[in-house]
Image (cartoon, rainbow, N blue to C red):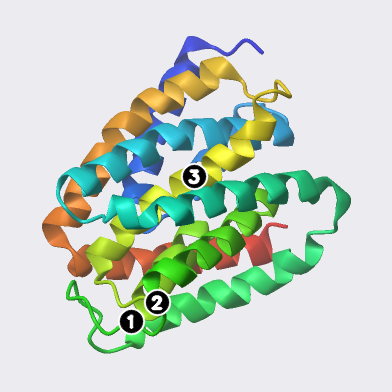
Amino acid sequence: MPLDPLVLLALGAVGMLAGFVDAIAGGGGLVALPALLSAGLPPVAALATTKLQSVVGTAMAAATYWRQGFVALRALVPALAATFLGALLGALTVKGIDTSLLALAVPGALIAIAAYFAFAPRLTDADRHARLAFPAWVPAMGFVVGFYDGIFGPGTGSFLTMGFVTLFGLGLTRAAGHTKIVNLMSNLGALALFLPAGDVVWPAALAMAAGQLAGGYLGACTGIRFGARIIRPLIVAVSVILALRLLLFR
């Protein structure tokens, strides 16, 4: 569909903001999706376009965290395959199920995550004792969260960061880096269905992707520079805003 050049310019700026927020705390779709709907895209096209543009920013953020040594990429390989498969199966399943229950349950989970990150003591960049074995259970988490992302999506980054911190003992900055890698695969899994179906609006996706490149890089650098001091409050804010949006704007 044709879009006015000024609209594309505005979407590029929105993409940059979405990429910045997403690289630190997740929730970039909270910024990108309403902007695409406001630009006149149908809901399915807006979802597909959001996934594509977010892949660019997430990949940039993931690469930045990895280059700075915050991600054990080799250890994540089984989890990445499981996450891709989970997201693909979730996207295949979504047309045949009623997601209204998720719209009610997810806000409660997001509020719980916000409360944990707001009030739990000793949430720092230091690694802690893992409750579960990383090689065996990270793929399981990736599959479950990937499946959720393919079906519904909001809060995926918050759920992954919560898991890496509470179950696998990662410090907040390392958790954010691992989250970006896994979230990238869940987005790609969903796109494996959206792209062949022709749902992506390419002018909007490319404009936002250009902004995502800058936003993803700047967000990752900010997260690395300030660590838990910025990651923790942003996760709280994004989780609360996502929960309120799901509850009040269904």
| x, y percent for residue 216 | 31, 39
The structure residue drawn at horizontal position 24% and vertical position 38%, both measured from the top left corner, is 217
| x, y percent for residue 23 | 33, 49
Instruction: Report the amino acid beneath label 1.
Output: Ala
- Residues at badges 1 and 3 in contact (C-beta under 8 Å)? no
Q: Earlier in the sequence, mark 2 or mark 3?
A: 2
Instruction: Report the amino acid beneath label 3.
Output: Met
Q: Nearer the viewer, mark 2 or mark 1?
A: 2
Quarter of the C terminus within the rendering: bottom right
Q: Nearer the viewer, mark 2 or mark 3?
A: 2
Classify 205 as above or below 128: above
Image quadrant of residue 2?
top right
Q: Residues within 10 Å of mark 3 (few under 14, many from 20)?
A: many
The structure residue drawn at horizontal position 61% and vertical position 20%, both measured from the top left corner, is 201
The structure residue drawn at horizontal position 35% and vertical position 74%, both measured from the top left corner, is 165
Q: Secondary structure at mark 3?
A: helix
Residue 203 horizontal side relative to residue 249, left or right: left
Q: In the rendered image, is residue 27 in sight?
A: no
Q: Nearer the viewer, residue 122 or 191?
A: 191
Which residue is labeled 3 in the image? 185
Which residue is labeled 1 in the image? 130
Q: Residues within 10 Å of mark 2 (few under 14, many from 20)?
A: few
The structure residue drawn at horizontal position 49% and vertical position 44%, both measured from the top left corner, is 185
Q: Nearer the viewer, residue 241 or 171?
A: 171
Q: Nearer the viewer, residue 242 or 122?
A: 122
| x, y percent for residue 215 | 30, 37
Q: Nearer the viewer, residue 130 or 98?
A: 130
| x, y percent for residue 29 | 51, 46
Residue 250 horizontal side relative to residue 11, left or right: right
Which residue is labeled 2 in the image? 133
Quarter of the N terminus within the rendering: top right
